Image (spheres, grey):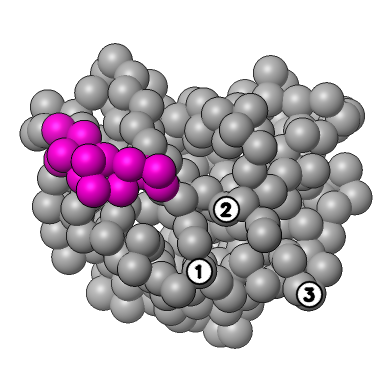
């Protein structure tokens, strides 16, 4: 049986932490959960530790000091998952904008349909976003179009953060050469997988903005991604 783990970075997610963990563990498929918490002052880590008593074999926690960025959180999780022998490694937000019920669809895209990287895509079937201001929808949609144009990568949702990696993809990517740390990290990881010749499949999802907690989006994140994509276009991608 394939071993699967869902990596969920958290910072001040006390309103969502318990609910998202229970939702993943309630799925018929056996998905383990790894929380990467960046020193949340609201007590998110304490909630996870309490739940570890109930889910002792399937819920794991890595605590880090201070906000170190989305990219470094995922890379910490990737290295942990590879060391622990997981076959499929997932990325998912804590705020229910990514539905846990879509995890089995991403898994099947890789395990049964031949993909090496499956992306939960907001834009491969038009625009499937709920509760976002129209300005943010337009900015996100055209940001992906910009990335496709600059990098030549045939992915509609280039900034998506809901993904399933086969372990061979993560084993092939040289993490020491991943430069972007915010949402640009999502673009850079996809581009590495694309340039290394892995098969990427987009799975249509409906993305719904968070109902609880506060968004971590900022203008600096978009700035990093804009300039980072141009630099990425001229960088040589090689296997780890």
* Whether residue 41 can be seen here: yes
Image spot of residue 236 (x, y percent): 87, 28
Q: Which mark is residue 17?
A: none
Secondary-structure class at tag 1? loop
Compare residues 20 and 188 and report the one nearer the observer. Answer: 20
Nearest to N terminus: mark 2 or mark 3 = 2
Residue 4's label in the rendered image is: 2
Q: How far across and how far down the image is residue 159, in percent? A: 55, 53
Q: Are marks 1 and 2 in contact (CB under 8 Å)?
A: yes
The quarter of the picture where the N terminus appears is: bottom right
| Secondary structure type for disc 2 | strand
Between residues 106 and 157, which one lies in front from this camera angle? Answer: 106
Which mark is on residue 29? 1
Q: Residue at x 26, y 74 (%)?
A: 131
Q: Is residue 223 visible?
A: no
**178 inside magenta stretch:** no
Q: CA distance from mark 3 to mark 1?
A: 17 Å
- Quadrant of the rendered structure where residue 65 is? top left
State the CA–CA distance, disc 1 to disc 2: 9 Å
> Relative to 118, is 198 above or below?
above
């Amino acid at each position: 049986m394939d071993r699967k783990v869902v990596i969920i970075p958290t910072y001040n997610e006390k309103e969502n932490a318990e609910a998202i963990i229970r939702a993943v563990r309630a799925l018929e498929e056996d998905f383990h959960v790894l929380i990467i918490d960046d020193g949340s002052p609201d007590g998110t880590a304490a909630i996870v530790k309490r739940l570890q008593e109930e889910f002792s074999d399937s819920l794991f926690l890595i605590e880090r000091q201070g906000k170190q960025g989305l990219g470094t959180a995922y890379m910490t999780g990737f290295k942990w998952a590879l060391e622990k022998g997981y076959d499929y490694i997932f990325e998912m937000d804590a705020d229910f904008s990514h539905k846990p019920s879509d995890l089995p669809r991403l898994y099947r895209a890789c395990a049964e349909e031949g993909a090496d990287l499956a992306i939960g895509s907001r834009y491969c079937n038009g625009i499937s976003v709920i509760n976002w201001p129209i300005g943010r929808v337009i900015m996100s949609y055209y940001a992906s179009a910009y990335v496709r144009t600059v990098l030549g990568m045939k992915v509609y949702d280039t900034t998506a953060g809901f993904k399933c990696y086969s372990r061979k993809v993560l084993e092939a990517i040289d993490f020491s050469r991943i430069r972007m740390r915010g949402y640009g990290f999502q673009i850079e990881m996809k581009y590495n997988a694309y340039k290394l010749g892995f098969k990427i499949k987009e799975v249509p999802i409906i993305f719904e903005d968070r109902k609880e907690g506060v968004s971590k989006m900022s203008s600096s994140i978009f700035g990093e991604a804009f300039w980072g994509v141009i630099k990425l276009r001229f960088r040589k991608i090689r296997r780890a």
